[in-house]
Amino acid sequence: MPTRLLPPVKSFDSEQNIRHCPICMEEFKRGDLFQPFGVCGHEFHRGCLNSWLQRGKSTCPVCHLDLRRAEIETWANIAGMAMKLLPPVKSFDNEENIRHCPICMEVFKRGDLIQPSGVCDHEFHHGCLNSWLQRGKSTCPVCRLDLVV
């Protein structure tokens, strides 16, 4: 099951807005780790949702949204969000300092559009990083730091 599609785990910190896990039916308590479910955002105890997905289920227990069907749309959203969060593209103009794009492995040439990652020091051809993100990748191709923070 593609758990990489799930948003980050959160810690429940509000006793005022009492909610419960739709899988185990227990109320969330302060400090409980809960997991929003992909695109629909329904929330579950992390352990409950992990057990659900490990049993081969791929749909939200509440609204039955299929995580696999939403994958393409989700990747497009992630890629679009990541591209908006990245620093501005710059033009490569230093041919004395020979560097290459870690995705296509080609040497940067004068005038190439270079895309800094923003979370690390790695840089890429703008088109290469855009393609990388469109293929559902959301981490730096070199160090694997998450580009969508």
Image (cartoon, rainbow, N blue to C red):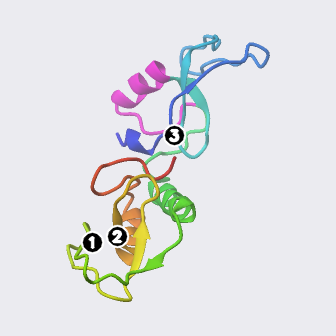
Is 118 or 65 nearer to us in this picture?
118
Element type at mark 3: loop
The residue under label 1 is 101
Residue shown at 34% from the left, 73% from the top: 128
Residue 52 on image: x %, y %:
42, 26
Inspect the image, locate mark 2, and give the three-letter code of the amino acid beneath it: Phe
Residue segment shown in magenta: 46-61
Label 3 – label 1 distance at C-alpha: 29 Å
Q: Residues within 10 Å of mark 1 (few under 14, many from 20)?
A: some
Q: Earlier in the sequence, mark 3 or mark 2?
A: 3
Crowd around label 3: few <14 · some 14–19 · many ≥20 (10 Å)? few
Q: How far apart are the two marked residues, 1 and 2, measured between alpha carbons?
A: 5 Å
Q: Nearer the viewer, residue 30 or 93?
A: 93
Q: Position of residue 13 (x, y in %)?
A: 67, 18
Disc count in the image? 3
- Which residue is the site of mark 2? 124
Q: Image quadrant of residue 72?
A: bottom left
Residue occupying the point 44% across, 45% down: 5
